[in-house]
Image: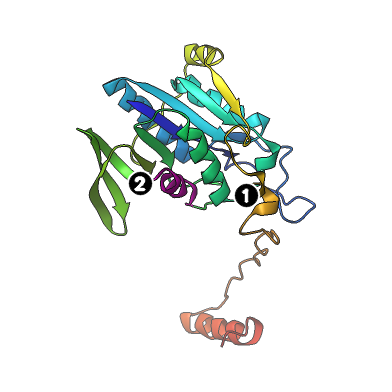
Amino acid sequence: MEIVVLVKQVPDTESLIEIAGDGVSIKTQDIKWVMNPYDEIAVEEALQIREAQGGAVTVVSMGPDKAVETIRTALAMGADKGIHINDPAAAGSDPLATARILAAAVKEIPFDLIIAGHRAVDEDNYQVAAAVAEFLNIPQVSMVVKAELLDGKIKCQRTIEGGTVTVEAALPALFTTQRGLNEPRYASLPGIMKAKKKPVDVKTIADLGIDPGTAGAANRKVKIKALNLPPVRQAVKMVEGETAQDKAAELVRVLHEEVKLI
């Protein structure tokens, strides 16, 4: 079983996010970068499938030099090899261009199954994995909480509003992970040491046959015009009064005279 896992490096959700001077990006100097949490679930699921059925796990990621840290994390968890798409011409690509680039990289290697997180916690687009499946012309199942490999197909339980639904798809296929599918393992010290020797192929978009005119920030279909922090909330106002009736009357006065809601 040849399994490909798509991973992304994202800011740690506990990092303090500040808007950069250009007003359309965030300051990255002091941010801690980690593997997207949903991609950790994808790596774990791939490892469990390999352990049960044999084969190999290849991790594919696109990003700058530091993105190799996330690939090495996946390798330390137990993945076999990595592909790092590292090209300034791809920086700032929108989800469609990102998917086109990732699909081009996957096309060059054998695969029976592709696993990815259903969303990245930085931009929350929910788009890349589905678009990769479309470019590869394979079925995809999203938000999977249970997966079972059968003869030439995969059976998945995916979350829907109010419950779950069971679907099947012929292999090769792509599915995206939801919380509850598994509990990602920690990388062991031996795993970390072994990861340093595992192969990571570095590719540019030219290597993959991607037209630079379809990638990068300048060629986004949807452009970010401005980033703004949420407005500062006013302090809580306590409504005073001797009795419930006094408090109710004061609340009505505040809503009418100060807040002007009524």
Residue 64 inside the magenta-drawn segment: no
Q: Secondary structure at mark 1?
A: helix
> Which one is in front, 140 or 101?
101
Residue to which mark 1 is pinned: 214
Q: Quadrant of residue 28?
A: top right
Residue range of the region highlighted in magenta in the rendering: 126-143
Q: How is the image coloured?
A: rainbow
Q: Amino acid at mark 1?
A: Thr
Mark 2 Cα shell of 10 Å, populated few (<14), some (14-19), many (≥20): many
**Residue 112 sits in quarter:** top left
In the shown orientation, is residue 36 left or right of residue 55? Answer: right
Residue at x 24%, y 52% (from the top left corner): 165
Residue 258 visible within the image: yes
In this view, which residue lies farthest toward the right?
21
Q: How many marks?
A: 2
Residue situated in front as seen by the camera: 234 or 48: 48
User: Which of the labelled discs sits on residue 140, or is there none?
Assistant: 2
Instruction: Please give the name of the residue rendered at 65% of the width and 82% of the height, measured from the top-left corner.
Output: 258
Amino acid type of the residue that numbered disc 2 sits on in the rendered structure: Gln
Residue 4: x and y in percent read: 42, 31
Q: Is residue 16 above or below residue 242?
A: above
